[in-house]
Image (tube, helix red, strand yellow):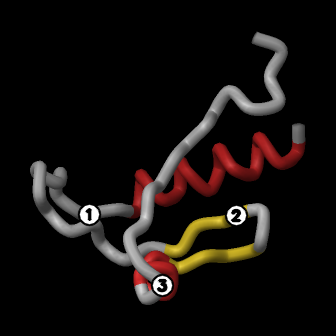
Amino acid sequence: MKRLIRAGAVLAATLLTSNAAALQIGDAAPDFTAISTRGEVTLSQVLEKGPVVLALYYADFTPG
């Protein structure tokens, strides 16, 4: 439960402090750092290894 609250707080803070315009189809994603199961991950570092797919599975660890 604490992880869910922390993840929600990080997401809310990111959205509230972001001044980026909406992306259009074909636009490159802006560089960002996110929390993963392996610690913090930066998009630019991961892109050095090849293409990246970002998946958000928000229903994980929920009863539904």
Point out which mark residue 36 bears.
Answer: 2
The front one of 52 and 10 is: 52
Q: Earlier in the sequence, mark 1 or mark 2?
A: 1
Q: Nearer the viewer, mark 3 or mark 1?
A: 3
Q: Residue at x 55, y 51 (%)?
A: 11
The image shows residue 50, relative to residue 58, as above or below, that is below
Q: Residue at 68% across / 27% down in the picture?
A: 59
Q: Secondary structure at mark 3?
A: loop
Task: Please give the label number shown on residue 49.
Answer: 3
Q: Residues within 10 Å of mark 2 (few under 14, many from 20)?
A: few
- Secondary element type, mark 1: loop
Residue 6, position in %: x, y?
A: 75, 51
| Amino acid on which the number 1 mark rests in the picture | Asn
User: Residue at (88%, 45%) from the top-left corner?
Assistant: 2
State yes or no: discs 3 and 1 in contact (Cβ < 8 Å).
no
The residue identified by callout 1 is 19
Q: Are marks 1 and 2 in contact (CB under 8 Å)?
A: no
- Label 1: few (<14), some or many (≥20) within 10 Å? few
Residue 62 point in image, percent of width and height: 80, 22
